[in-house]
Amino acid sequence: MRYPLLTIALFHCLIVLSIQVTQQSVIRRESDRPESNAQKKSAGKRLLIYSGVSQGYLRIVSRKNISANAKKDDPYAVIITDFRKEGITIMGEKSKLYLCIHRKNGKMVAMTSPKIDRKRYYCFYREDTTPDLYTTYSPVDKLTWKLLFSRDGYPRRANNTRVDPKKTIFLKDVISNKR
């Protein structure tokens, strides 16, 4: 080797450049990274769902604590409805639980995901609007069933065949998406 210092200097420059290129590509990958599914997914509509029968708002507190006798300022009364290809999902914003109906007995329960057990629960709904602007919710797989509550705000079985149409009506009160 005739020029040992020049060889060492070139080798050093090559290493420094490769380190810089590697760092830049790592930074570029982090900035170009697509948003996660949770960030991409729209939050849906934030609503208060008012029951015409119980004269209270729908609230989902826990798996078996579902009622329609909440006041407007109850934090568990804020509901998020999300439109998916299967139908509408109804989720409590604070509890993060989805409103579902048991397939056999028609009882309402809250689940952590609408797709956990599709063989046992109906979690996707069809929203129908009546001419007088009331809304009814029925499971997509069983359109003869409806969401309904008693006058006290307790959930009634959806498979109740003697349903008065007045017991199934709801009003939607849209909340702004600012939190």
Image (tube, helix red, strand yellow):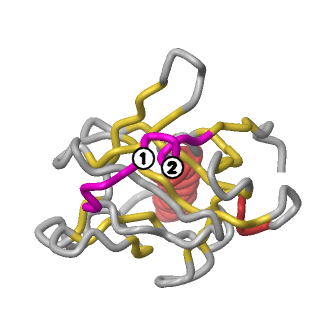
Dot 2 lies on which element? helix
Q: Quadrant of residue 16?
A: bottom right
Q: CA distance from mark 1 to mark 2?
A: 6 Å
Q: Are marks 1 and 2 in contact (CB under 8 Å)?
A: yes
Residue placed most toward the observer, 119 or 150? 150
Q: Residue furthest left?
A: 119
Q: Where the N terminus falls, by quadrant?
A: bottom left
Q: Identify the magenta region.
A: 159-170
For mark 2, does the 10 Å Cα neighbourhood hold few (<14), some (14 to 19), or many (20 or more) residues? some
Q: What is the x, y in percent for residue 139?
A: 28, 49
Image position of 122 (left or right of 167): left
Q: Which residue is mark 1?
A: 164
Residue placed most toward the observer, 28 or 145? 145
**Vertical arrangement, residue 28 with respect to residue 90, above or below:** above
In the image, what residue occupies the spot 49% across and 46% down? 33
In the image, what residue occupies the spot 47% across and 60% down? 11
Residue placed most toward the observer, 17 or 132? 132
Q: Which residue is mark 2?
A: 167
In the image, what residue occupies the spot 68% across and 48% down? 50
Q: Amino acid at mark 1?
A: Asp
Q: Amino acid at mark 2?
A: Lys
Is residue 10 visible to the viewer in this orientation of the structure? no
Image position of 7 (left or right of 175): left
Residue placed most toward the observer, 60 or 149? 149
